[in-house]
Image: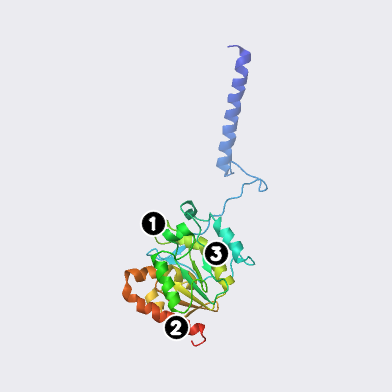
Amino acid sequence: MTAVDENPRVELRRAVVTLRHRLEEQLDLGIPLARRDSATAVPQTRQPEPPRTTETGQLVIEPPPATGPFDGWSLEQVRAEAEKCTRCPLHTTRHTVVFGVGDPTSNLMFVGEAPGHDEDLQGEPFVGRAGQLLTKIIEAMGQTRDTVYICNVLKCRPPENRNPLPAEVQECQPFLLRQVEMVSPKVIVGLGTYAVKLLLGTEERISRLRGRFHDMHGVAVMPTYHPAFLLRNPNAKRDVWDDMKLVVARLRGEG
């Protein structure tokens, strides 16, 4: 190897030693090793705040605001947005988005928990066994599925019909709020725990809430048992019917 070949390596070694000494001096003086111009710095992605839960892991949701992020949107625009939604992992396992059905000008709205197997395949809420029971309840009230509006808190089916996760409820909340705002019903029937939690922002049990109306920004909310619960507990059907009689009376202006 010639002297000419050695010179670049010698110079390189000297440069490395010099740089190391300077870095050590900076560390001793407390000077940061690297600085980025604020104009060229890569912005850090803001991580969403985790949903609040109780010590037992139950979802805590504040009473929903009167308006949401879809202000000014039509119901069909919100539906289109929901159908392409990827806000939570449920979009990777769903077959269809189950948005809502019925009369968007109805004075009566039913809000359930989440789509099940049949709903996920057909794209319509409450079409399985629990849905058939809900249809009978609606007809007993003198209405039909076409004269009321029916939807769920979640628009996608949770795998194996498990309970909704707090983050899933949080991401789907804007869709439901806009549905409520656009339908503008006189009465909302909250079917089951998760619907009532979201509508009223409460951790109170359905058994303590049902039987009387609660206010959601001027809309009367009647909490009651989910039809799926009634299939497992037929004795609770009388309680639900008592609740629905109060709803019918309120719609008639009698309560």
Amino acid type, label 3: Phe
Query: Residue 125: horizontal and vertical position, in percent?
Result: 47, 64
Q: Residue at x 53, y 57 (%)?
A: 48
Tell me which numbered mark, 1 or 3, is placed earlier along the sequence. Answer: 1
Instruction: Determine the residue positioned at 55% across, 57% down.
Output: 83
Question: Could you tell me if residue 98 is visible in this image?
Answer: yes
Q: Residues within 10 Å of mark 3 (few under 14, many from 20)?
A: many
Q: Which residue is mark 2?
A: 246
| In front of the other: 171 or 175 | 175
Name the residue that disc number 1 marks: 160
Could you say which quadrant of the image residue 54 lies in?
A: bottom left
Q: For the residue labelled by badge 1, is the local secondary structure a helix, a strand or a loop?
A: helix
What type is the residue that disc 1 sits on? Glu
In the rendered view, would you say 188 is above or below 29?
below
Q: Is residue 83 left or right of residue 119?
A: right
Look at the image and tell me whether residue 69 can be seen: no
Identify the image quadrant of residue 243: bottom left
